[in-house]
Amino acid sequence: MKPVIALVGRPNVGKSTLFNRLTGTRDAIVADYAGLTRDRHYGDARQGRHEFIAIDTGGFEPDCTSGIFQEMARQTRQAVAEADAVIFVVDVRAGLSAQDHDIARFLRTANKRVLLAANKAEGMKDGPQLAEFYELGIGEPHPISSAHGQGIRSLIEAALDDL
Ligand code: GDP
Ligand code: MG
């Protein structure tokens, strides 16, 4: 079985952009992976020698009636439960938000390997913008740019190390 990496985070941080970059598709290949539920977005992904399955979250069924926040929380919980490692995506340009703290609180109790990806970091020097994300208690933020393909290889290597 390939390892599974879930991409979680509040809306608009760049999860789907990262997913598309990892899977090399604009729209995910949705396949029947045994034991995985169907309403999230699964794709075959490859980075260097690593092959894995990526799960995007935050897609909403048009007939979703439970409300956007409950639906997000539900998708996040389910994706995390299915994953071997979790990439928690935050937006380094927007800075920390209350929703980031909520997600971090959940992830700290989830007993999974969690990597913190500070997205939209293209053209940024290491330093002040990254430092505030240590507050989330998830560890070191990995600066990446999903749009420009920067920092992604080392993020995935850290996520899959020894898995
Ligand atoms: P999601 O809601 O978390 O899935 O976020 P999306 O992938 O839909 O991206 C939200 C917005 O952020 C879009 O306008 C993207 O083009 C933009 N975005 C995503 N990744 C990057 C990045 O690395 N740098 C910049 N500057 N913008 C990005
Ligand atoms: Mg998305």
Image: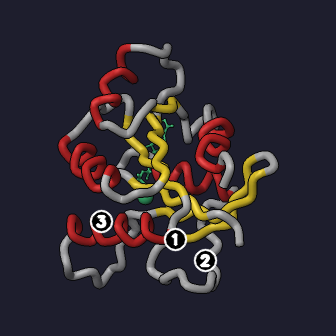
- On the image, the x and y values in percent for residue 45 come to 69, 59
- On the image, the x and y values in percent for residue 159 come to 59, 47
**Which quadrant of the frame does ligand 1 lie within?**
top left
Colouring? secondary structure
Name the N-terminal-most of marks 2 and 3. 2
- On the image, the x and y values in percent for residue 99 come to 22, 48
The amino acid marked with disc number 2 is Val
* Image position of 132 with respect to 153: above or below: above
Q: Secondary structure at mark 3?
A: helix
Q: Quadrant of the C terminus?
A: bottom right
The answer for how far apart the CA atoms under marks 2 and 3 are is: 19 Å
Residue at image coords 39%, 23%: 130
Residue 11 in view (yes/no): no
Q: Is mark 2 within 8 Å of ligand 2?
A: no
* Residue that label 2 marks: 30
Left or right, residue 57 beside residue 48: left
Q: Give the numbered dot on residue 41.
A: 1
Q: Give the numbered dot on residue 72.
A: 3
* Image position of 49 with respect to 36: above or below: above
Q: Callout 1: 10 Å neighbours few (<14), some, many (20+)?
A: many
